[in-house]
Image (cartoon, rainbow, N blue to C red):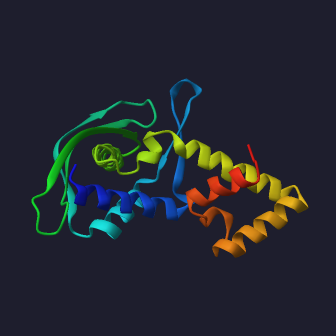
Amino acid sequence: MTTALWKRVEEVNQALDRKGVKVIQEIKAGGGRTLYGFQPQSVFDAMNEVFGTDWGYEVVEFSQQSLGDKGMNFYGLVRVRVWVKPAPDVEPVTREAFGGSRNNTPGDALKGAVTDAVQKALSTFSVGRMAYEGELKAYYQCYQKIAEKLRSGDSAIKKAYQDFCKKHGLGRLRDWPLSKLAEFCEQEKIK
């Protein structure tokens, strides 16, 4: 990846960090596993914020299958091509990815498949890499532990929280940048 593209991707990842824990979604996977990822709209918003019109995607192919009366009875599968420009007057770099989604309506199954594929393609540029490196689970759990301690009435944590907010100009906990959550948990030895 070129230096210019890497710099813009880092700006996208910083924008995702600034959005806080509210853009993390828990995804219940098979076998009792829980995965953590960024909500698709937050990724698209961060891309738009940094790249503007210097990025996009196209659906290269798609298929759809009716699954009958099994609930979530439509499955969409798509292949998308995502393109990003390292700089405004530079040729775009492209990546392709597949995505799938099961839903109650044909349109929602395809829409889910597209957002899945676009996020997968963007991940090959390292967009949202915190999710793919497994860091979002730690941020999410850190948030939950801080919130739990604050609800418990722990006066030492409440004072540390207020001081930290004042020092860094922070508001509500769910709006803190992810990096600040980690910093606070480390500072206060919250595990």
Q: Residue at x 67, y 49 (%)?
A: 142
Q: Is residue 180 left or right of residue 27?
A: right
**Quadrant of residue 151 in the image?**
bottom right
What is the x, y in percent for residue 105? Answer: 36, 46
Numbered circles on residues, count: 0
Q: Work out whether 49 lies above or below 29.
A: below
What is the x, y in percent for residue 65? Answer: 28, 33
What is the x, y in percent for residue 138? Answer: 61, 44
Q: Is residue 80 left or right of residue 30?
A: left
Q: Residue at x 24, y 40 (%)?
A: 97
Q: Work out whether 53 lies above or below 6.
A: below
Q: Is residue 188 left or right of residue 42?
A: right
- State whether residue 190 appears in this view: yes
Q: Work out whether 75 lies above or below 4.
A: above
Q: Residue at x 35, y 30 (%)?
A: 67
- State whether residue 153 appears in this view: no
Point out the image quarter for the C terminus.
top right
